[in-house]
Amino acid sequence: MSDITFCCERSEQYQLSLLTFPFSFSVIFAYREIPIGDSVLRSRAKDFAKEIVFLCRETKQTHRESMLANQLLRSGTSIGANIHEARYAQSKPDFISKMEIALKECYETEYWTELLFETGYMEEEKYSLMQNTAGAIRRMLSASCKTAKENRDIRENIADYNGEF
């Protein structure tokens, strides 16, 4: 595998990897390097929030549509904000609550992107990209909430255990 680094139009650095297979084809894929100490979920949510900001700015400028764009802006940027805030939760229930709020915001964001697309304010290519990204984040959030709840239940059972085998 060989690596090439490049910058896209928004000055984010991506790593290109070339995978060569023995049966005469190669695959090139791009991924953004995630800073040490940052999670994939937080990083994807932040990147998604930036895309939401760019999309809403463009929608307001080109279509002069602000009500739907503002709704999308609020819900789309709230996902990452709640994930970030969950990192500093005061307790396990607080963490779960913040992650569930982020999950609800993700569902709402999918709704607003669908509405913008169906009313002609968003192109199909952009809509598909936004829905796919929101779906991936939603699945990660759902899995995180499930894991956090399972871990909480295990800890509660251990705390209730009186020491007898």
Image: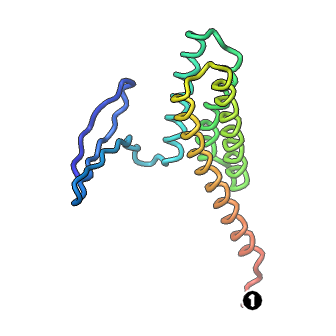
Q: Locate residue 21 relative to residue 146 in the image: left or right.
A: left
Q: Quadrant of residue 67?
A: top right
Q: Which residue is found at the position 68% from the left and 44% from the top?
A: 103
Farthest residue in the front direction? 24
SS at mark 1? Answer: loop
Vertical order, 119 against 89 (above or below): above
Name the amino acid, label 1: Glu
Tell which of 72 and 89 is nearer to you.
Answer: 72
| Residue at numbered disc 1 | 164
Quarter holding the C terminus?
bottom right
Q: Quadrant of residue 73?
A: top right
Residue 85, image x, y percentages: 62, 41
Q: Quadrant of residue 116?
A: top right
Residue 88, image x, y percentages: 61, 46
Q: Residues within 10 Å of mark 1 (few under 14, many from 20)?
A: few
Q: Which residue is found at the position 63% from the left and 9% from the top?
A: 64
Q: How many marks do you count on the picture?
A: 1
Q: Which residue is found at the position 49% from the left and 41% from the top?
A: 43
Q: Locate residue 72 relative to residue 13 in the image: left or right.
A: right
Residue 20, image x, y percentages: 23, 54
Q: Locate residue 165 relative to residue 73 in the image: left or right.
A: right
Q: Locate residue 115 relative to residue 12 in the image: left or right.
A: right
Residue 92, image x, y percentages: 69, 56
Tell which of 107 and 50 is nearer to you.
Answer: 107
Q: Which residue is found at the position 21% from the left and 49% from the top?
A: 2
Vertical order, 89 against 158 (above or below): above
Q: How is the image coloured?
A: rainbow
